[in-house]
Image: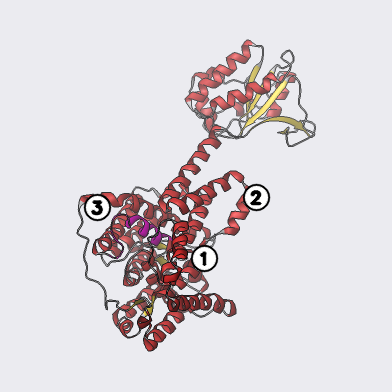
Amino acid sequence: MLSKFFPGLLWLQGYDGDTFRSDLFSGLAIAVMLIPQGMGYAVVAGLPPEYGLYACIIPPVIYALLGTSNKISIGPVALDSILIITGLSVLAEPGSDHYLELAIALTLMVGVIQAFFGFIRFGFIANFLSNPVIVGYTSAAALIIMGSQFENMLGVDVEGGNLFQLVYQLLMSMQDWNWVTVGIGAFGLLFMVYSKRIYSGPPYALILLVLGMVASGVWNAQGYGVDVVSSIPQGLPDLTLPNLGAEDFIDLMPVALTVALMGYVGTMSICKSQEKPTDKISAKPNQELLAVGAANLVGAFFKAFPVSASFSRSAAFREAGAMTQVSALVSSFFILITVLFLTPYFQTYPLPKALLSAIIIVSVVGLFKYKEMIKLSRHSRREFAILMATFVITLLLGVQEGLFVGVALSIGMVIYNTANPHMTELGSIENGRLFRNVNRFSDAKVRDDVLIFRFDAPLYFANKDYFVEQLYAWIKHRQSDKLMYVLFDAEAVNSVDSTAIQMLQQVIENLRSQGVQFYITNAIGPVRDVISTSPMRDYMCEKTMFSTINDAIVYIDGGVNVHARSALQTNDG
């Protein structure tokens, strides 16, 4: 009974000691990743570092109870952080009390939106973000995130703007760079990059933080003007909600919708890409919406900022041997111990922000998917154009604008493809046994008295004009005194609307007036059902509808429809 409300409990069926050992060690491994990542992504979002730790404690526990995947790690992610800073910085100064209240309200709204979409079974909304849009958006966001960390790496403050403006301002302020900070940041980058090349096992991010804190405390990094994290509150925050007005929530709505959508899409992408046929539980989109939404909703009460699944951390989650979300519970418990007992050490051993920035930069480099860009440029120019448009707009105008443009272009491409689908003339091969595209098969034979064509899409109001235009163009290229029959191969047509029915009637009447007969072949059950209940029902007979193209040819040559019953029968496949 409990598993109906908490699907995560299903993973405990058959749970044994070996599984727990795998979850225990993987949970500890993910915890040492989450501590520096959570703090770093909180800084990216314009929030105090402790907010990142709070986001690693309660939300993963909620997801573990409600989620349906054992392959993802829930927590702070880079893309959500950059969405937060770009969306909220126009409403309040990052780091201010009002900004912090807006961030918590945003988490609450994201949770409500995701949970609501889950209740009304809107999980299919993930399909509206195509892969080119996601690649272009995440690649641009990776560059923006890295650029946003240059200030901490160089020890200067600039006005900002888009990535190009930011880089220009940083170069123009070179005389103000804090070279001690630059050295610390450079050391952090080199340590993170080259240590992994030598041996990829240890948690280098956590090791770097500990070494940096010890060195900063011993040599008094603050005395050299190095910006540090020196105060993190001990224990969990009080259960509070933001004190905001209705106007604030209205202002937050566009950001909340964007974060909710992107967080869910990222989570489902990871779930589906790692799913196997042998998994005893499959990820359910609507339940995932509920689970991630509940994680954010409850996390808002504990000053967590929005969470979702992380690509890199989920990969580490699996590689570390995690078998169930019990691993996430272990991680949350370990981080809770850190918050309760270890945070006072930051006062004695402050953490240089340049090291956090180095960790963030190395973490998000993998989001810049240049290899996928190259592959797509060779595979599909149209989709590559959408990718590049999303990429450039995101860099120049911002992540929300880039995402909107990418989604709009993807929907536009879908509309264009359905309004201008593939439509081809067919010819016979292998002595008339098969009929294939005349443009692809050089040996395809075409009879002067018969025009055969195939339409590879649903036939409806948006593409009926294209259908007529292309058909009449083929007819005009034929000798009018020889063409007597037009065969419409409807095998790839899975639906027909009333507008298309009217169009077909007009085409049939027009051709009949010219002495040309119009036949339909290979119509599937749903299409025959629509015709049988439409004004075209009288057309549906053994002299006009055929099971195969070959049957139609036999009828043309001999006057016999050998499979008349199957061609006319409705309410089947």
Residue beneath label 3, please?
Answer: 248
Compute the Cα span from label 3 to label 1.
34 Å
Residue 94 within the segment the image draws in magenta: yes
Residue beneath label 2, please?
Answer: 378
User: Where residue 83 appears, x then y in whole percent?
Assistant: 39, 57
Q: Amino acid at mark 1?
A: Val
User: Where residue 185 appears, x then y in whole percent?
Assistant: 46, 75
User: Of marks 3 and 1, which one's residue comes earlier in the chain?
Assistant: 3
User: Alpha-carbon neighbours of circle 2 within 10 Å: few (<14), some, or many (≥20)?
Assistant: few
Which quarter of the figure is the C terminus placed in?
top right
Please say if the residues under marks 1 and 2 sit with CB atoms less than 8 Å apart. no
Q: Which mark is residue 365?
A: 1
User: Of marks 1 and 2, which one's residue comes earlier in the chain?
Assistant: 1
User: Where residue 133 appears, x then y in whole percent?
Assistant: 50, 50
Compute the Cα span from label 2 to label 3.
46 Å
User: Of marks 2 and 3, which one's residue comes earlier in the chain?
Assistant: 3
Q: What residue span does the magenta drawing correspond to?
A: 79-95
Quick check: can you spot residue 209? yes
User: Where residue 199 appears, x then y in whole percent?
Assistant: 57, 80
Residue drawn at x 77%, y 32% as measured from the top left? 444
